[in-house]
């Protein structure tokens, strides 16, 4: 019986899962949602692992919130410009 390796990985803002049996790839890395990654990690009670995943997700969340704030500000500027152009017409 050959070994089975299932890998959950995080790189460049994406979580992926892959599976190999020996040297044969059973499942090429495919993207999973962050909530699915956290659920998978919670099934394995290894000290420090779930905390590491939660820290990554918190950092991603903070980055997404900052991006959303920038986009809201940009949208407000564009809408104000549209109002100015509407008043000028």
Image (tube, rainbow, N blue to C red):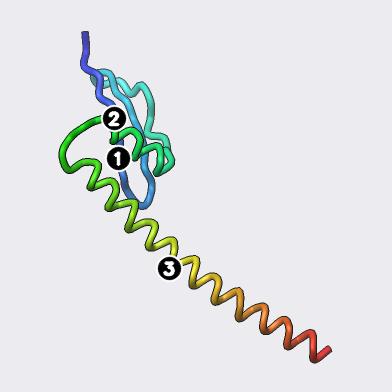
Residue at figure coordinates x 28%, y 46% from the top left: 53
Residue highlighted by disc 2: 43
Picture quarter containing residue 66? bottom left
Helix, strand or loop for disc 3: helix
Residue at figure coordinates x 43%, y 41% from the top left: 33
Residue at figure coordinates x 25%, y 19% from the top left: 4
Mark 3 residue crowding within 10 angstroms, few (<14) / some (14–19) / many (20+):
few
In the picture, measured across the screen, residue 77 lies left or right of residue 28, that is: right
Helix, strand or loop for disc 1: strand
Q: Position of residue 86 (x, y in %)?
A: 79, 84
Helix, strand or loop for disc 2: helix
Q: Quadrant of the C terminus?
A: bottom right
Residue lying furthest left: 47
Which mark, by number, is residue 56? none
Tell me how far mark 2 sits from mark 3, CA to CA. Answer: 31 Å
Of badges 2 and 3, nearer the viewer stands: 2
Of badges 1 and 3, nearer the viewer stands: 3
Residue highlighted by disc 3: 66
Q: Is residue 29 above or below residue 12?
A: above
Residue highlighted by disc 1: 9
Q: Is residue 70 above or below residue 25?
A: below
Upstream in sequence: badge 2 or badge 3: 2
Q: Position of residue 19 (x, y in %)?
A: 32, 25
Upstream in sequence: badge 1 or badge 3: 1
Of badges 2 and 1, nearer the viewer stands: 2
């Amino acid at each position: 019986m050959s070994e089975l390796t299932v890998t959950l990985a995080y790189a460049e803002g994406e979580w992926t899962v892959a599976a190999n049996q020996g040297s044969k790839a059973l499942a090429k890395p495919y993207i999973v949602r962050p909530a699915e990654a956290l659920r998978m990690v919670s099934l394995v009670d290894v000290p420090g692992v779930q905390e590491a995943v939660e820290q990554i997700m918190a950092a991603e969340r903070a980055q997404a919130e900052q991006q959303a704030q920038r986009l809201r500000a940009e949208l407000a500027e564009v809408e104000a410009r549209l109002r100015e152009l509407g008043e000028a017409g």
